[in-house]
Structures are given as C-alpha cells and as structure tokens.
Image: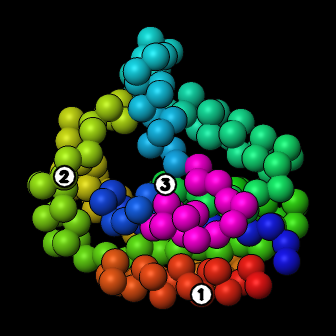
Amino acid sequence: MNRLLVMTVGKTHSGKSTFGQTLASHLDNACVIDQDNHAALINTYYKALLTKHGPNLLKYSVLETIIDYAITQTDLHIILCNAFRSHIGRSKLLDKFRNYKFTTALVYFDIPDEVLAARVTTTQRSTAIFRSASSFGEVLARQQAESGKGDIVPPSADEADYLFTLGSNKEAQAVVDKILALTL
C-alpha cells in the first residue's frame, strides 16, 4: 500500500478536526496536520508578521513547509484538516501528493448550515486562530456567502482517488472504517 493522504473539506464546525483525530487514532503511522494549530501558533508568537488584509500567506507558508517535511522526511500517512474549499487550492495540494505516489482521499463534510449555525453559537473553541474574524459565526456567514462562487465548490469524484461525503457526523465512523480498509 502506498502512503495515504486524507484531506478534509468543509465549513467551520463541520467535524473535520475531530474526524482527523479519530482517524489518526486508528491508523498506524499517521500524522494530522491541522492549519488551525498553525494559525494559533502564529497569532500567539508572530502576530506582528501578519498582513492586515488578503490571504494569510504566513499560515500557508507554514502549512507548505510542514507538508513538504512530512512528505520527504517521513513515511507517515498524512491527514490534512482544514476547510480546503477552494478547488484550485485542493488541486495543487493533491497534485503534490500524487507526485510522491500517495493514494489520495477527500472527505467532504456536507453538514447542513442550520446544524453548523447551532454549533458555532455554543462552541467552546478558542478564537486564537482568527486574524480577520471575531467569531465562528462570522466565519460561517462568510463561508456560506462564498459557497458556489468562483472556485469555492464541493469536491468532485474525479479530484482524488477516493471521495467520501458525510451528510452528518453520525456517518464518520463508517468513513473511518472505509479509509482504514484502503490501507490493508
């Protein structure tokens, strides 16, 4: 079996990080790379380096460096946890992993917006990851407005070797089991 890349795709509070941690706890020789951790690190120690407007290039540079290291310096399966809602961004990352002969899987969290709205109102998650938002509600509203515009689209079956879609988090364990079966 080749090394495996699992990339999560979805809006805030859809269960991407929880899924990634669950999968990693069952998948031998795996590493979770979560961009929220990078954002928290940058906002805690390197806030002065952040641009005021536009994309958070520092966060993306940190992500790219960690991914490059994980690909070239380890033999780990890699679980990427972030929104990855941009088709162009997903495609670039997937191509990088394909160049290193990874088997690629996308896990799309198609959780209803009303479920996500309820979650962001009761969340206990730290807002230390924010650069340009004040709440997860604001992040969700922005993501809802962006959906379907430009290249902010759900993944399609032709993007990766495997595509799994979850309409509810109750389906997560079944998807974990299917991904684990890929490594046998």
User: Foreground mark, 2 or 3?
Assistant: 2
Mark 1 lies on residue:
178
| Few, some or many residues within 10 Å of mark 2 (<14, 14–19, 20+) | few
Amino acid at pointer 3: Asn
- Seen in the picture, residue 107 relative to 94 is either above or below; the reply is below
Which of the two residues, 159 or 100, is positioned nearer the viewer here? 100
Indicate the position of residue 83 as horizontal and vertical percent values.
46, 57
**Mark 2 sits on what residue?**
123
Q: Rounded to the nearest whole Å, what is the CA distance between mark 2 and mark 1?
A: 29 Å
Give the labeled residue for mark 3.
82
Determine if residue 177 is in view: yes
- At a point 34% along the width and 78% down the height, the residue shown is 169
Amino acid type, label 2: Thr
- Residues shaded magenta: 19-33
Is 108 left or right of 3, judged from the image as shown?
Answer: left
Of the numbered discs 1 and 3, the one sitting upstream in the chain is 3
Residue 159: image tag = none
Q: Is residue 159 visible?
A: no
Identity, as a three-letter code, of the amino acid under mark 1: Lys
